[in-house]
Image (cartoon, coloured by chain):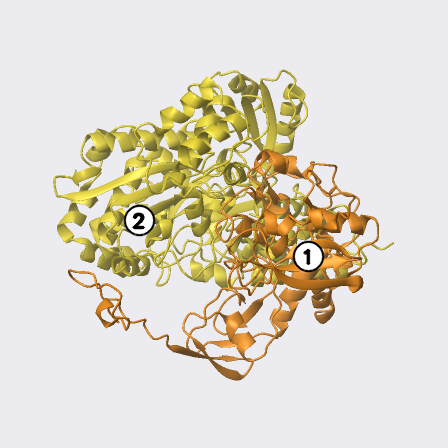
């Protein structure tokens, strides 16, 4: 390719960072897929991506600089202008908002100066959307460039901890029981090993039954594994609830090569279950991906991990390495002639990349813009090839299905929502955390499991399913938490977020923050979402500041029309759900009142 | 047909096994119903093509016959029975038995909203086609409130993905910003950009393979940009002007046209458009020369011309300045 470059040169450190990453990689065919890893390498080393470094990356990967810049400039964790080496991302999203995020922002501002500025040239801070640490809110992520880079997630975060972490001090984090209160309870299937084994030890994993499911799967053969998954009636746990067995069946007859992708880009506000699984039982995910690859005939898997999860990154990197050393991944797994390996890729701060086709574009080194469907990924996905893409929790469910059989799995839960489920409980409950319960547990029972309502105990509203979900009220505590049960109350289970807000929370600010979230996370591709999310935020801002344009009724009518156009005409699920939670709140809660002037 | 069947016996026949070219698969007809009319189109045809075949005028903005459909503007959405959401007619393939509505309440609402959202955020003063659509769908962009003042020069180019200033004073955000004038041939007025991706496609694999511009930023701050917003003369731009040729809103404009408009001297009623053949090389591109007051003011090429597909190079597009010099 004949490319044109500006005169900017890379410095030796930038070149070394790029070369080190690319050494040993096969730079043929789809070499552009390494663009995101290369940009991470530069960002990790220097704290920003300079024009010279970008030129060098583009020369190595044969990518036009304008396109590579457009990719770098798409992701919130990449800095494309001169930037201090240390960045503190302070979560001010809804779960943290309910638990002191503004106080934390004020402390950080006092210490580091106004948002985005730097007093000493060493550190700066930015507000951030949900960091997936909601059970220990308020949260912050400290990202420190260097060799090696030091990234630390802090929750609960204090101003003092943030400052210490910014100068490289490792801050001890609370015991795992603060995230998984059920540790050690009998009967758990998905959380059985969490907190019971050393997540860095393959031997510990095997001693706790690890890789028995893989052996069993190899004995059964691929077709039988798919049959069991179909029989289990497992559906996707990422939010869309598509039947996993159907997806796998479709893939088995598709063209080769085909790819397996694990969607670990968990970023729905209020969602942190996949993080807890990956941090504390990483080998389980690798085993499950290997079974999925075996069953669907994929020899290569990609694990696309949310960029804001440094601990999960370290744990999975380690687990992959251990598995390769011991023949659980590679050319001849368990000596059975099965070939499968996994490439770990980091996202870089973009909620939209949790959308499956946007994720594939991101893996290919492109902007995370969703593709139009059809064609669906099982037909034409990653690199245009048939692709099976599943969420972390979905995959981990395959282990009990293989061990105990699809029928036994289907007996758990309800007729239409089968199996165990992880719930992300945060906000105003006494013991926030990840909870495992069979489908069908009622909202009230789950809240009880989490110690009952917290805060003042006077709950105004409960958000179900995340920012793309819906608000319900304490009147709905008897609703069973199933796909059909939540639908019956006009809500959605989504990614199983349960977030109560007490009466100290200004729900107008929560709605405005949700609207801001969608505006910030829209990829910008299609008009209904790109501009519609802006107009929705502006409208909610007017209402939150008691300055409606015309009457309140006119504003609400406009909001409804915006919602319908976004739902009907947006390319992907982001725009299609951007007004859902807001509209549900307006329908159920007396949030805005007409002012008597 | 094989080589051996070649009618002209003077053409040497290659030795060895003769490659057999499979006959083209006959394209099956797909039958569907649009607005109550049944229509048959060849397999692979889009809903837009099917609708056009029976005379239904579907509005389009980001679609152009000589570019790959990107289906981002969403003004062409139609309702397909059984589909949860509306679908873009420009890229959705016709399927047997589809029942399509192109003028339902849902379709009209989404099209009107798309126009209002664009009208409230983009300067559409040089996009007469969109003004026509606005009238057709009774769009009122002003109902979102008064526009915020335009951004300062290059301010939008520094936006951080995932961050934006809070709305204030009840004003609506727009893409307003100063015009980028950094070369003698064309200007970029991104206040007028609807982000249809056409210029990026024309600069890239759909025509020029130069890749001087791409999408940068995200969300409402997404924009067309060179790397790090460097001026065009520092970028890969080769000044073919094919981006101007495909721009539907006048965001990309010949400097000659821009200067005349600035001087309030641009007058299409005084212009003639004459087709001729480009004199520079042997390719034989058709040029449409636009002349006002006996001066060439811009050069285009017909989109349906089989040599150019509407695209030119720097010489054909801009190499006429000498004609305007009388001395």
Q: Which chain is tinted yellow?
A: A
SS type, badge 2 = strand
Location of mark 2 (residue): A259
Asked if residue B64 is positioned above or below residue A397 in the image, the reply reads: below
Picture coordinates of residue A182 (x, y %)?
38, 38
B130 on left or right of B50 = right
Label 1: chain? B
Residue A505 vs residue A80, the one in the foreground: A80
Q: Are marks 1 and 2 on the same chain?
A: no
SS type, badge 1 = helix
Residue A420 vs residue B248, the one in the foreground: B248
Name the residue: 50% across, 49% down.
A369
Q: Are marks 1 and 2 in contact (CB under 8 Å)?
A: no
Task: Check residue A579 in the rendering and tell me which mark sits there, or answer none.
Answer: none
A227 on left or right of B75 = left
B174 on left or right of A471 = right
Task: Check residue B117 in the rendering and tell me which mark sits there, or answer none.
Answer: 1
Name the residue: 35% across, 49% down.
A394
Q: How many marks?
A: 2
Asked if residue B100 is positioned above or below residue A233 in the image, the reply reads: below
In the rendered image, which quarter is residue B125 located in? bottom right
Label 2: chain? A
Say if residue B191 shows up in the picture: yes
Residue B251 vs residue A592, the one in the foreground: B251
Residue A362 vs residue A351, the one in the foreground: A362
In the figure, the shade used to draw chain B is: orange
Query: The N terminus of chain B appears in which quarter of the rendering?
Result: bottom left
């Amino acid at each position: 390719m004949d490319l044109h470059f500006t005169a900017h040169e890379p410095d030796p450190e930038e070149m070394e960072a790029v070369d080190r990453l690319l050494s040993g990689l096969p730079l043929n065919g789809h070499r552009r897929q390494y663009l995101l890893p290369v940009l991470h390498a530069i960002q990790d080393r220097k704290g920003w991506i300079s024009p010279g470094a970008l030129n060098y990356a583009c020369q190595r990967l044969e990518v036009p600089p304008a396109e590579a810049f457009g990719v770098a400039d798409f992701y919130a964790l990449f800095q494309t202008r001169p930037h201090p080496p240390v960045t503190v991302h302070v979560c001010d999203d809804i779960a943290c908002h309910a638990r002191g995020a503004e106080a934390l922002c004020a402390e950080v501002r006092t210490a580091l100066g106004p948002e985005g500025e730097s007093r000493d040239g060493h550190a700066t801070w930015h507000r951030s959307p949900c960091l997936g640490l909601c059970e220990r809110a308020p949260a912050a992520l400290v990202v420190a460039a260097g060799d090696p880079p030091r990234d630390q997630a802090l929750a609960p975060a204090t101003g003092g901890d943030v400052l210490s972490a910014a100068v490289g001090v490792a801050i001890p984090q609370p015991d795992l029981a603060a995230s998984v209160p059920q540790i050690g309870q009998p009967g758990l299937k998905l959380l059985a090993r969490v907190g019971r084994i050393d997540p860095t030890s393959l031997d510990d994993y095997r001693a706790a039954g690890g890789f028995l499911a893989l052996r069993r799967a190899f004995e059964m053969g691929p077709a039988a594994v798919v049959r069991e998954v179909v029989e289990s009636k497992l559906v996707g746990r990422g939010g869309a609830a598509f039947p996993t067995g159907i997806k796998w069946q479709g893939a088995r007859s598709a063209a080769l090569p085909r790819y397996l992708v694990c969607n670990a880009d968990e970023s729905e506000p209020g969602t942190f279950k996949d993080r807890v699984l990956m941090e504390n039982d990483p080998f389980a995910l690798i085993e499950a991906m290997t079974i999925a690859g075996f069953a669907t005939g994929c020899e290569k898997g990609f694990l696309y991990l949310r960029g804001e999860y440094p601990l999960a990154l370290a744990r999975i990197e380690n687990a992959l390495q251990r598995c390769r050393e011991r023949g659980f991944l590679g050319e001849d797994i368990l000596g059975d002639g099965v070939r499968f390996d996994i490439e770990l890729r980091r996202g870089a701060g973009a909620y939209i990349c949790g959308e499956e086709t946007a994720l594939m574009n991101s893996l290919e080194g492109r902007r995370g813009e969703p593709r139009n469907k059809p064609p669906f990924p099982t037909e034409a996905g990653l690199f245009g090839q048939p692709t099976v893409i599943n969420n972390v929790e979905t995959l981990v469910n395959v282990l009990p299905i293989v061990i105990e059989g699809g029928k036994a799995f289907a007996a758990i839960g309800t007729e239409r929502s089968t199996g165990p489920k992880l719930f992300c409980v945060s906000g105003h409950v006494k013991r926030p955390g990840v909870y495992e319960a069979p489908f069908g547990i009622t909202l009230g029972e789950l809240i009880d499991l989490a110690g009952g309502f917290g805060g003042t105990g006077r709950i105004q509203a409960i958000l179900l399913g995340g920012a793309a979900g819906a608000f319900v009220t304490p009147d709905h505590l008897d609703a069973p938490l199933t796909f059909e049960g939540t639908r019956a109350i006009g809500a959605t289970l989504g990614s199983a977020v349960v977030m109560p807000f007490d009466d100290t929370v200004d729900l107008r600010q929560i709605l405005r923050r949700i609207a801001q979230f969608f505006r910030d996370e829209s990829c910008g591709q299609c008009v209904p979402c790109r501009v519609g999310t802006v107009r929705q935020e502006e409208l909610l801002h007017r209402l939150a500041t008691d300055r409606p344009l015309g009457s309140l009724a006119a504003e609400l009518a406009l909001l409804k029309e915006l919602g319908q156009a976004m739902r009907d005409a947006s390319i992907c699920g982001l725009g299609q759900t951007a007004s859902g939670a807001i509209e549900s709140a307006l329908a159920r809660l007396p949030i805005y009142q007409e002012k008597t002037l | 047909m094989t080589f051996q069947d070649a009618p002209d016996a003077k053409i040497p026949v290659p030795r060895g096994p003769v490659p057999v070219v499979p006959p083209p698969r006959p394209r099956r007809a797909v039958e569907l119903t649009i607005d109550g009319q049944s229509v048959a189109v060849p397999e692979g045809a889009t809903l837009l093509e099917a609708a056009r075949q029976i005379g239904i005028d579907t509005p389009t903005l980001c679609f152009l016959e000589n570019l790959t459909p990107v289906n981002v503007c969403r003004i062409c959405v139609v309702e397909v029975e059984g589909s949860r959401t509306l679908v873009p007619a420009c890229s959705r393939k016709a399927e047997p038995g589809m029942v399509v509505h192109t003028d339902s309440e849902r379709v009209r609402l989404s099209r009107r909203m798309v126009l209002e959202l664009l009208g409230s955020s983009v300067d559409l003063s040089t996009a007469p086609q969109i003004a026509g659509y606005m009238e057709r769908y009774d769009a009122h962009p002003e109902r979102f409130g008064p526009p915020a003042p335009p951004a300062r020069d290059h301010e939008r180019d520094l936006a951080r993905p995932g961050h934006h200033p809070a709305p204030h004073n009840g004003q609506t955000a727009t893409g307003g910003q100063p015009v980028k004038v950094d070369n003698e041939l064309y200007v970029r007025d991104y206040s007028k950009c609807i982000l249809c991706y056409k210029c990026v496609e024309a600069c890239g694999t759909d025509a020029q393979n130069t890749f001087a511009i791409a999408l940068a930023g995200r969300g409402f701050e997404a924009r067309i940009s060179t790397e790090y917003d460097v001026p065009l003369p520092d970028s890969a731009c080769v000044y073919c002007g094919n981006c101007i040729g495909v721009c539907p809103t006048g965001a990309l404009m010949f400097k000659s046209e821009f200067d005349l408009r600035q001087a309030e001297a641009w007058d299409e009623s005084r212009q003639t458009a004459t087709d001729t053949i480009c004199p520079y090389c042997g390719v034989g591109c058709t040029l449409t020369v636009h002349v006002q007051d006996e001066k060439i003011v811009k050069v285009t090429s017909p989109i349906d011309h089989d040599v150019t597909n509407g695209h030119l190079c720097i010489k054909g597009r801009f190499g006429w300045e000498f004609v305007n010099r009388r001395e």
